[in-house]
Amino acid sequence: MTPPASAAGTAIDAGIFKAYDIRGVVERSLTREAARAIGTALGSEAAARGVAEITVGRDGRLSGPWLRDALIEGIRSTGVNVADIGQVATPMLYFATYHLGNGSGVEITGSHNPPEYNGMKLVLAGEALYGEGLQALYRRIVAGDLLESGTPGALRTVDIRQAYLDRILGDVRLARPLRVAIDCGNGVAGSIAPDLYRGLGCTVTELFCEVDGNFPNHHPDPAHPENLQDLIAAVQRSGADLGLAFDGDGDRLGVVTRNGHIIYPDRQIMLFAQDVLAARPGAEIVFDVKCTRHIAPWVRRLGGVPTMWRTGHSLIKARLRESGAAFAGEMSGHLFFNDRWYGFDDGLYAGARLLEILSRSADPSAVLEALPDSTSTPELQLQTAEGENVRLVERLRALAQDGTGARSHFPGAREFITIDGIRVEYADGFGLARPSNTTPVVVLRFEADDPAALARIQGEFRQAIAAVAPGVRLPF
């Protein structure tokens, strides 16, 4: 299908405007012309909101420099100024919007996607642009509702690296030096993580910290166990206290212990919540629907207020902004400190805060491994046709909300949570089915007290899914 052309003559693929960001295959759906058009639309929206300057950064992908040039050209064509901060991790872009005082920025990043992808994460006037905000930019382009200034906006180059390091090093204090191995997966975090953790006093073993947009060693996504095997080996080989891993743009954190155990982000959330609540009694702690059921009782015991929320880093940030919650986390590894930090997701800062907590213990790995745990699955994906993932989950929800259907297909259910897909709570576990907002899959996750309970819960979901989508191939 030929993408629609705007009145300004620019063709752009609607499919690159995702739920949380802009993302596409470079020189196919995400072209130079598309990047310029996005810049023009963003500049037009910025001008309408009275925003005078937009910060632009990029990760280490090979297409970053020319996408940056096209984006900046588009922004400046509207008369809006640009602060170019160069090659930086996504949280450094977010930090720059505070440090420079403009509250607005674009990080050109493909995050953890394959090398042929790139994209953009956007903040305007202090708010993450997602969902309807991104669709509004697309509509501007299609309608040709684009500001053209006779005088281009000014361009300045700013190095915020030292300011970012100083801000974290001035905030985080380790009780004693630690030995840490870090795996940056050849993503952009490698350009700053070693200096950050050495600045905290750590002995650092570096793994794949050379920024290389080809990602020659492994995929830069710590959510998948296969991408953490090199780090586990490095921790054990070097005698490090623990290992930290980062995704392609540095906004997500993975953690492994000296014994080779992966501490998934929902367990990290419990440790961070304990630390935050010690300083902020009664604070709200937000976590997404994919997380362990251990979080809510853990937070309540510590005197906090647990809130389960919809998955998506932009949605979590919006919740923090609205509620003033002190901390939030997602199963994917996005962690948001809103106490001593700014409330955006920052894997590098989260790593520093983790080291601060663990430095108070003689055995950091023991602290991590003692966190409540259950038998669980990783995130499973049921592949569907485009749009079918949403319809399948809607049919599951309808089944659960029908009294007869709920009793016959979910006989052990204690509660149905429908804020994001359907999460079925049991006395001894939970099952989740939610439609991905970025790809045509149904995301599934299961947790239980023991393998027998896990198998029972999966059996109920298997029966229910078969009732609404006969013949579908399940990943469990």
Image: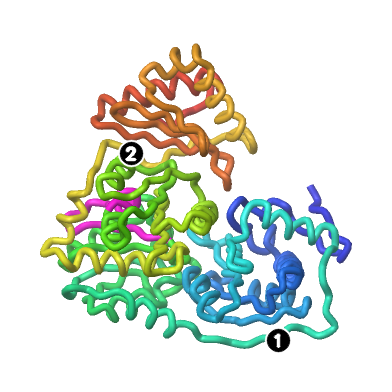
Tag 1 and tag 2, C-beta contact below 8 Å: no
Percent x, y of residue 34: 73, 64
Residue 118 seen in the current view: no
- Indicate left or right for 453 with 132 as reference: left
Residue displayed at 33% across by 79% down: 169
Residue displayed at 55% across by 81% down: 100
Amino acid type, residue under disc 1 in the picture: Ala
Amino acid type, residue under disc 2 in the picture: Arg
Disc number at residue 154? 1
Find the distance from the CA under tag 1 to the CA under tag 2: 51 Å
Percent x, y of residue 273: 31, 55
**SS at circle 2:** loop
Single out the residue that lies furthest toward the front: 282
- N-terminal of the two: label 1 or label 2? 1
Q: Using a 10 Å C-alpha cutoff, classify the residue at mark 2 as few (fewer than 14 neighbours), some (14 to 19) or many (20 or more).
A: many
Q: Quadrant of residue 292?
A: top left
Magenta residue check for 261:
yes
Q: Using a 10 Å C-alpha cutoff, classify the residue at mark 1 as few (fewer than 14 neighbours), some (14 to 19) or many (20 or more).
A: some
Residue displayed at 39% across by 57% down: 327
Residue 12 seen in the current view: yes
Q: Quadrant of residue 157?
A: bottom right
- Indicate left or right for 365 with 164 as reference: left
Q: Quadrant of the C terminus?
A: top left
Percent x, y of residue 309: 47, 45
Q: Quadrant of residue 283?
A: bottom left
Read off the residue under disc 2.
293
- Residue placed most toward the observer, 131 or 307: 307
**SS at circle 1:** loop
Single out the residue that lies furthest toward the right: 7
Bounds of the magenta segment: 252-270
